[in-house]
Amino acid sequence: MKIASVSAGKGVETDIVSIDRLKNPKTSYINSSELIGLCYPTHGFSLPWHMLRFILAMPTVKGKHVFLLNTRAGSMLFGLHLPGISGIAQWLPMLILWVKGYKIRGLLPLDMPSNWISIHPGFPTRVVNKITQRCMYLCERFTEKILSGKTFYRPMAFIFIPLDLFLIPVSLGYLLIGRFFMAKTFIADYKCTNCRICIQNCPVEAIKVKFGHPYWTIHCESCMRCINLCPERAVQTAHGYVALVVFGFMYIHFFNMFSTYFMQYIQTDLSIIDGLMEMTVFTVLAIPFMFISYYFVAWLQKFKFLSAVFRMTSFTFYWKHYMATGFKANDFIKSREKNQN
Ligand SMILES: Cc1cc2nc3c(=O)[nH]c(=O)nc-3n(C[C@H](O)[C@H](O)[C@H](O)COP(=O)(O)O)c2cc1C
Ligand code: SF4
Ligand code: SF4
């Protein structure tokens, strides 16, 4: 929005296209644009699958200009602005676009207030406003630079390259497996009134109804919108359940180790096979374990007392939710409804 308003001030026409429910990029749009900007959040030291899929589907071109803006988890400590970590959120799209013939005109890692309320409480409004103000300033400068025809990579994009490289296994782990686990940590507790606001406003249509309640599918990108919009504060990241699952996995792991040692005891020199077998058994058991246990947990929400236990053992029930500066949940819900009519 800020980039569009600065551009408008300079007489440059912009079009903001939300890709959340757009299955494929419109080639005509890309061909007719002089400069394309791809803006997306950083998730798990990577980028959301939706965005990556969109970039992969972008047509091959000859020297079309594109800039990348990835928002990250900015925070503040003793008045100091702390940056988030991009991981492969910039380098992977950059590589794909470069192979497809695009010229990368700008790189802006932007440290927005962290919204990851599954793992920490929402920041106080004062801090959110301060971080946002700084982001507005950075966006303005960035827009001015790239509109002047220059190539501009914010130095911050390069400072963390060693850390970004070091984190590649974690980034890929999140993209290929981790995000599915994250999707299975959300529940709608007994306070849910079935108003369907979370379902209608999910950008990727990841919530369906099961057992008479919202049910999170693996398509969830963990953007946190449903948690923040629910008027009853009924959407929780079920930390109590997550802790149980972690103990469950540990149990499987120890059981697995025990069986490996038993195999070693009855045979000799099986070290490589042992390792591979341990990994395979663990993964094969962990995935169905996660899906079945989530299905069961969703069913348990029918029982008020049990659902109350899940609610009370979720940190999201206690801590502050996140709201961006100048943003009211109700306005957003109304504007979405208006767009859909
Ligand atoms: C599931 C999830 C994973 C995240 N992973 C990262 C990360 O790896 N690095 C980072 O700097 N920020 C991370 N964040 C923080 C977000 O990138 C940041 O809060 C977001 O870009 C803010 O923009 P938004 O409010 O428009 O989503 C993560 C947030 C969520 C919800
Ligand atoms: S927004 Fe909240 S109350 Fe409404 S359906 Fe979703 S979980 Fe239930
Ligand atoms: S966190 Fe909620 S709103 Fe966001 S993608 Fe997942 S289900 Fe949809």
Image (tube, rainbow, N blue to C red):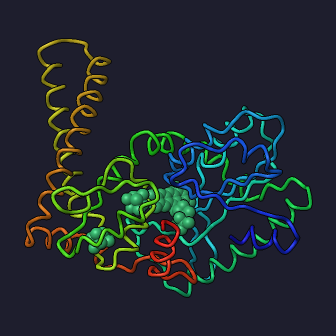
Q: Residue furthest top?
A: 268
| Number of marks in picture | 0
Q: Is residue 97 left or right of residue 180?
A: right
Give 168 or 126, whichever is nearer the viewer.
Answer: 126
Q: Indicate whether 9 appears above or below 281.
A: below
State the image coordinates of residue 209 (x, y, percent, origin top left). 24, 57
- Name the quarter showing ligand 3: bottom left
Q: Is residue 311 left or right of residue 33?
A: left
- The residue lying at 76 percent from left, 73 percent from top is 5
Is there any visible trace of residue 315 in the rendered image? Answer: no
State the image coordinates of residue 95 (x, y, percent, origin top left). 69, 37
- The residue lying at 72 percent from left, 48 percent from top is 29
- The residue lying at 69 percent from left, 77 percent from top is 134
Give 148 or 135, whichever is nearer the viewer.
Answer: 148
State the image coordinates of residue 168 (x, y, percent, origin top left). 55, 41
Q: Indicate whether 288 appears above or below 133.
A: above
Residue 74: image quadrant is: bottom right
Residue 288: image quadrant is: top left
The quarter of the rendered structure image containing the N terminus is bottom right
Residue 299: image quadrant is: bottom left
State the image coordinates of residue 127 (x, y, percent, origin top left). 56, 83
- The residue lying at 52 percent from left, 47 percent from top is 50
Q: Residue furthest bottom?
A: 126
